[in-house]
Amino acid sequence: MTEAKPHGELRRVLRLRDLIFYGIVVIQPTAPMPLFGVASQEARGHVVTAILIAMIGMTLTAVSYGRMARVYPSAGSAYSYINGEFGSTAGFVAGWSILLDYILNPIICVIWCSAAAVNFYHGIPIQVWEVLFAVLFTVLNLRGIEASSRTNTWMAISMGVVVVYALAMMAHYVFATHLPNQPHDAAFFTRPFYDPATFNLRAVSAGTALAALTYIGFDNISTLSEETINPERNILRATVLVCIFTGVISAIEVYAGQLVWPDFSHYPDVDTAYVYVAGRAGGMLLFHLMNATLLVASIGSGMGAQIGAARVMYGMARNQALPSVFAYVHPRTGIPSKNVLLTGALALIGAWSMTYEFGANTLNFGAFLAFSGVNLACFRHEFRNALPNGRVPLTTPRRWMPLLGLAVCLYIWASLPINAKIAGVIWVSIGILYFALRGRRR
């Protein structure tokens, strides 16, 4: 007979396939499409290479997340991992960096959704669309409306069908647009990986820093540790498999896009470039279908990121890392409504004052600072606890994997544009100053 669970304890019901599907839904099968145009121009046509390089760093970091989820199975966040290994100061910096990630995500979603809406109807200025989407995200989150698991499942399946249809149309376009008896040569098909005429290591590095946005969200899997059957094994496996799946499907999507539209320097609208790529391959039907699909996906991402930001602020305030006002929960809806209003206002202000590219790069500043911290925390934990005497054989490869992940994350982080670094440094400096002043007042 099964023993009853104590009141309030989460039930372990999630299997490996449940975790994998959850990760795919969070990241979304259309993840690289909104940033395709900007990343393609940044990497000078080598966005496929950028996606694959970023996958290496994300997969190694996923291993670190999975290992740390074994140590802190009830936390599932960079904040807790780094706080547990390096103390409250480092933990606060990690949490503050993650907060930058969550605040900027709704901003770039508002920017992208507004640009996509203009594709449907040109009569309304984009600034008005930005107001409408910022208000939409906020109102829906204030009402506590969240998509159910079944709704998310069907949304992911629907997006997957559109992706498959788009790839089929792109393949047909590529193979049907060559001259009779003169098929495309081998260089045409390898150019998205390496084009000697445009290749530049610095440009590819900058493109990689932007393309890494594709993978943001894989770490959410670790938050399900308390609800997972055999979390010690399945959290690690699911996180790694989701990163690899995302990298492969994203590389295929952007590869097809670059074959259809080889001239990366000219897009009608760089923010919604993939929509125009789809339109070239499949006509106005696919143009509008892809535009609608990405619009729905970005609305879901924006809403999720906004409530995520509100909950991060709530969690930090509950732990007294932020003022207590951020720990307020609305008595009827049970959500941190003041935080939702604040992040909604920031989303609108940000959409009016920054570009998609700047917002995405600055978001990655916070994300990769936190990812680097998780890799370092994993290495420290592995090094200290591998053997009873604390000594780790230097010849054991798995002991050094976190350092390799750290190196790739720092490489991507260092490749961010200078304006994103300046904005990120200012944000972190404000957090450190606040942390120091708060410590003095205690």
Image (cartoon, grey):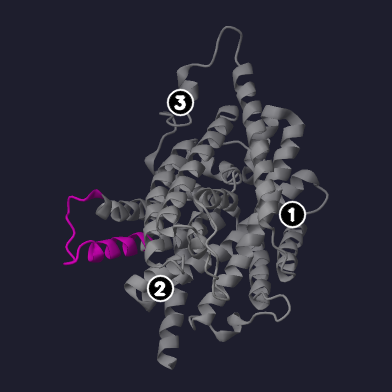
Residue indicated by mark 1:
126
Res. 9 visible in picture: yes
- Are the residues at dot 2 and dot 3 in contact (C-beta closer than 8 Å)? no
Is residue 242 left or right of 117 when viewed as pictured? left
**Mark closer to the observer (2, 3):** 2
Q: Secondary structure at mark 1?
A: helix
Residue indicated by mark 3:
190
Residue 57 is situated, as x and y percent measured from the top left of the image, at: 39, 49
Residue indicated by mark 2:
91
Marks 3/1: CA–CA distance: 37 Å
The earlier-in-sequence mark between 2 and 3 is 2
In the displayed orientation, state which residue is furthest to the right. Answer: 123
Marks 2/3: CA–CA distance: 44 Å
Residue that appears at 76% across and 57% down: 129
Which of 187 and 339 lies nearest the eye of the viewer? 339
The earlier-in-sequence mark between 3 and 1 is 1
Q: Secondary structure at mark 3?
A: helix
> The magenta stretch spans which residues?
374-397
Residue 35 is situated, as x and y percent measured from the top left of the image, at: 57, 46
Quadrant location of the C terminus? bottom left
The earlier-in-sequence mark between 2 and 1 is 2
Which of 248 and 185 lies nearest the eye of the viewer? 248
Q: Amino acid under label 2? A: Gly
